[in-house]
Image (cartoon, rainbow, N blue to C red):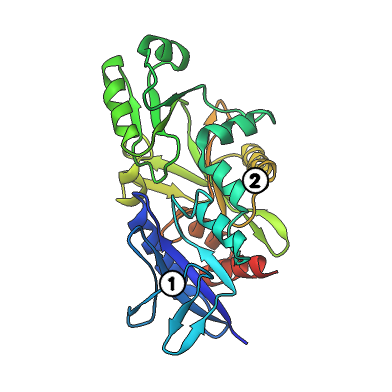
Amino acid sequence: MKKNIAIVMGGYSSEVNISLKSGNVVYNHLNKEKYNSFRVHILKEKWVALDDLNTEYSIDKNDFSFLLGDKKIIFDCVFNAIHGAPGENGALLAYFNLINLKHTSAPFYQMALTFNKRDTLSVVKEYGIKTAVSVYLNKGDVVNLDKIIAKVGLPCFVKPNNAGSSYGISKVHTKTEMLPALEKAYKEDSEILIESFLDGPEVSVGVIHHKGETKVLPITEIVTENDFFDYEAKYLGKSEEITPARISEVIKTKVENIAKKVYTILNMSGFSRSEFILVDNEPHFLEINTVPGLTENSILPQQAQAAGISLNELFDNAIENALH
């Protein structure tokens, strides 16, 4: 009998439209002979399932089901394609845990931890993983610009602590740019991370659980036309993503081992994509994305393709892992 799969997409953050694109790609590539798949929009104003004609059916939040005519559709598994809240920060997954519904992401606590950049950095540092020097602020904190700059130096990066797709991030070159950068970041989150500039090539490393083992996908080198890998670079063609990365076998092995170590340290499962800057050939960990972009042009699908894994197989593998 076919399994009923809910592909959740949308969310409550600035990444809603990116998530809808990812979710639709998953929907289009899931094996229709094997699964009854339904797109489910999780939005602030509504939770609805959609049929092939885009007719909406309200989700019953008591058990995450919906009525299709006189038939109640109960899901066997959820494919999580929500970037940001509430899919990537663990909130929705905690609800699925409460109603005993399987899903393709890591457990809700791991998702909540890894969505918080500061807390993730605090954990990996304890295992000897190199990172940037950082300062952490809560909205309303007294800001001592001289003290911050003395610690992290210039240029530096100002980031929302809990956000993705480079929303709210600024590269700050001078003291006068700092306060506007903080204001921009606070529009996305009430917690801010300020990090020292790491000078070196940026690489992105996908790690998945595939056929019973933790698999590191071919590494991608990020070459951007912009000052850093911002929203334009990621989504508007202002960057070149080179897979496999143009790095030596020695550095490749080093990055792979650290990416796999990070995945293991954080007790991850499902998809992940970690970002590193190579400073004097030493990988410095930036962050981990646990619901990375899943469109045909996104980095993790590119890496899977380079590893000989089609989108159909990539998505099917995630569901099979979740079910079993």
* The furthest residue to the bottom: 70
Element marked by disc 2: helix
**Residue 190 placed where, x, y %?**
39, 33
- How far is disc 2 from disc 1 in space, using C-alphas? 33 Å
* Rendered residue at 69%/54% (across/down): 214
Looking at this view, name the residue that lies furthest to the right: 212
Nearer to us in this view, 157 or 118:
118
Task: Identify residue type, mark 2.
Answer: Tyr
Q: Secondary structure at mark 1?
A: loop
Residue identifier under label 1? 59
Left or right for 317, reference 80 = right
The label nearer to you, 2 versus 1, is: 1
What residue is drawn where x is 66% and y is 55%? Answer: 215
Q: Residue at x 38, y 41 (%)?
A: 166
Vertical placement of residue 19 versus 316, above or below: above
Where is residue 142 shown, x and y percent of the image?
A: 37, 16
Tell me the kind of residue under disc 1: Ile
Between 114 and 86, the one nearer to me in the picture: 86
The crowding category of the residue bearing disc 1, from other C-alpha atoms within 10 Å (few below 14, some 14 to 19, many at least 20), is some
* Quadrant in which the N terminus is drawn: bottom right
Q: Is residue 227 visible?
A: no
Estimate the x, y position of residue 128 in percent, counting from the top left: 68, 28
Q: Position of residue 254 (x, y in %)?
A: 66, 37
Specify few, some or many for label 2: CA neighbours under 10 Å numbering under 14, 14-19, or 20 or more: many
Point out the image quarter for the C terminus.
bottom right
Marks 2 and 1: CB-CB under 8 Å?
A: no
**Residue under label 2:** 263
Image point 70% across, 65% down: which residue?
A: 211
Looking at the image, tell me whether mark 2 or mark 1 is earlier in sequence order. Answer: 1
